[in-house]
Image (tube, rainbow, N blue to C red):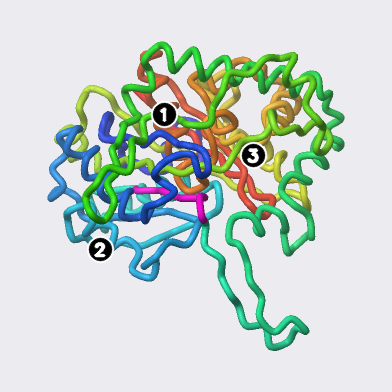
Amino acid sequence: MKKGNPMFSRARIPYGTWGSSFFPAWQMSPLAQVNIAQFAGEAANYIFNKRKVPKNTLDYLIIGSTVPWHWKFWTAPLVSSLLGHRLPGYHMEQACATGLQATVLAGMEVQSGANDVVGVLTFDRTSDSPVGVFPERRAYERTFALSDVWDNFGFDPATGNAMITTAGIAARKHKLDRREVDECAFYRYKQYFETLESGFLDRLLFPFELLNVQGRPLGKVDSDAGVRQVTLGGLRGMHELDTCVTSGTQTHASDGMATLLVTSKAKVKELSTRPEIDIQFIAKAEVRTGPSLMPEAPTLAVQKLLGRTGFTMDDIAVVKNHNPFAVNDVIFSRVMNYDWHNMNKTGCPLVWGHPQGPTLTRALIEGLEEAVDLGGGHVLMFGCAAGDVGIAAILKVS
């Protein structure tokens, strides 16, 4: 793949056809009480109406989630009905890489000519996550119960380690200094609150009022509830849970949805709110690093991506990532010789939360909006996923 050649010559992301809910923390909003797929479909309908996107232009729907929800068997066809338009489609998941991977898959649908307008709708609810009961005939414990969110985060069956352990192991491998990790986390909070005050997030985050089955108000989802101002001294004083990891330097479970469209070059001007803006897919890469080294995997994916395309970090205008641990960003900075102050300028999942499925979708939307404000440029998106996987992609805004 050469530097100037996009991976999908036909596919485009139409500017302004996207949107996201806020991501309230676990159990801190009415989202804890609803079917998240129903909410996501109805919320996407609202967003597309606000963006003046005719739903009858959609040909296909790719949904992404990682936490089981009631009626998940029916996947995208059900969610499209909740969106108000009966569409074919499917469900995909790749842990916290789901949002970016779903967008790339939509690009493939358009590039192949199978569909001209593909909706990407990602969502998850970690609150009151389901418990599955599995028959285990070959084990002494004949019936095994698994709490989908908490047990999976606490135990990787391939390594026996919890996700937080991967951060500690990676921090020790790369000889990180906790003082720098604390400083990075503090700076990430500063970036988020400055962006919130600037009004930037008003362009992509939508407030929603939720109703119960009787049609009575449950309450509003109009903030990233759970995000609080921090001080560097407060972060310094937190108990170290593993090497360079405290409760203040890791993300938190949350709920939410995010959506966008992918369409053909021929149709993009019909849908975009600013037709003069062109958003292309340039390249994507994935890697799997060593056991229990998840936080370094995104950096390795970026190295692979840059090596394949001929890009350098000097070619990138916006750097945005999924960072469940501040350790992720400091490792990237060390290995890539890149100043972590220049990343995540409009906020990041470390601060605003981690509903898994839509996490990288929201980060991507923020990154594209930031590039538009800069007058264009290349956007580097990357993140980690369960199983010590890293994903990275470059998009071009012009």
Q: Magenta span has 76? A: no
**Pick the front one: 260 or 325:** 325
Q: Residues within 10 Å of mark 3 (few under 14, many from 20)?
A: many
Q: Secondary structure at mark 2?
A: loop
Magenta stretch: dominant secondary structure: strand
Residue lying at 64% horizontally and 52% vertically, measured from the top left: 386
Quadrant (top left, top right, bottom left, bottom right) of the C terminus: top left
Residue lying at 21% horizontally and 36% vertically, measured from the top left: 268
Front disc: 1 or 3 = 1
Q: Give coordinates of residue 311: x percent, y percent.
A: 56, 28
Would you say 108 lies left or right of 304 here?
left
Q: Residues within 10 Å of mark 1 (few under 14, many from 20)?
A: some
Q: Is residue 365 above or below residue 54?
A: above
Disc on the earlier residue, 2 or 1: 2
Q: Which residue is under mark 3? A: 298
Magenta residues? 121-128
Q: Are marks 3 and 2 in contact (CB under 8 Å)?
A: no
Task: Name which residue type carries label 3.
Answer: Pro
Q: Which residue is under mark 1? A: 223
Q: Are marks 2 and 1 in contact (CB under 8 Å)?
A: no
Task: Name which residue type carries label 1.
Answer: Ser
Q: Secondary structure at mark 3?
A: helix
Task: Name which residue type carries label 2.
Answer: Pro
Q: Secondary structure at mark 1?
A: loop
